[in-house]
Image: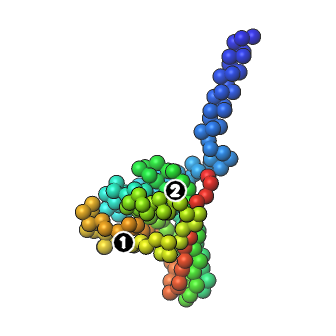
Amino acid sequence: MTGWSRRAFLASATAGGLSACAGGTNSRARFTIDDKVSSAVQQMHSELPFTRGLMDSAAGVLVVPTVTKAGLIIGGSYGEGSLLIGEAPVDYYSVAAASYGLQAGGQQYSSALFFMDSEHLQKFRARAGWTLGADLEFTVLDDAKAAGIDNNTIDEAVYAVVFNQAGILIGISVEGSKYTRIIR
């Protein structure tokens, strides 16, 4: 009888420990996001090699592996990703945007926000919702501009990188984006 009690105790302790590690009912969604973010980071480094050094220098990086955007005069986009400190995911965020203007089409892309100092990273994490451009200024890096980026030339607080673009969205519009922490 004591053998059964020990096994029952060990089984329940193991199950309890594993459920505590799972972090709640949305753990599958969290692991799915983590897998997609990992793949997106590898693709970003492949497409834009300068991002390796940028990521090593950053206090944190918010990677959104898939943002889906569509519009016909009125448009919108949505995506979910994770904030990486070091290479570990620490928080999960959604980005939602609305746009208005002469636009038509749809596209998907991946994005990364590089927080180059802990002060701006802390501002981002402290807010319930963070609006790109209004709450914090940022600089968009494309392949041509970023060719000369290294540890000696980094002088902005936040860099935005867009990569892995697919689809067609044409036109001119005004857009506002908001980042919100989500529980996963």
Q: Secondary structure at mark 1?
A: loop
98 left or right of 132?
right
Q: Which mark is residue 79?
A: none
Whether residue 65 is visible, yes or no, is no
Q: Is residue 1 visible?
A: yes
| Residue at the right extreme, as displayed | 1
Image quadrant where residue 175 sits = bottom right
Local packing at callout 1 (Cα closer than 10 Å; few below 14, some 14-19, many 20+) is few
Please give the residue where the numbered disc 2 appears in the rendered image. Answer: 82
Q: Residue furthest top?
A: 1
The x, y position of residue 146, in whole percent, is 31, 69
Q: Position of residue 49 (x, y in %)?
A: 32, 60
In the rendered view, tell whether residue 14 sits above or below residue 96.
above
Which residue is located at x 57 percent, y 81 percent?
99
Q: Nearer the viewer, residue 41 or 167?
A: 41
The quadrant where residue 92 appears: bottom right
* Residue 169: % across, % down: 52, 79
Taking 157 as reference, is 14 above or below it? above
Quarter of the picture holding the N terminus: top right
Alpha carbon separation for disc pair 2 and 1: 22 Å
Q: Amino acid at mark 2?
A: Ser
Estimate how packed mark 2 is, as few (under 14), some (14 to 19) or many (20 or more) residues with alpha carbons within 10 Å: many
Q: Nearer the viewer, mark 2 or mark 1?
A: 2
User: Is residue 6 positioned above or below 19 on the image?
Assistant: above
Q: Position of residue 136 (x, y in %)?
A: 46, 71
Measuring 39% from the left and 72% from the top, which residue is drawn there? 139
Residue that numbered label 1 is attached to: 142
The residue located at (69%, 12%) in the rendering is 3
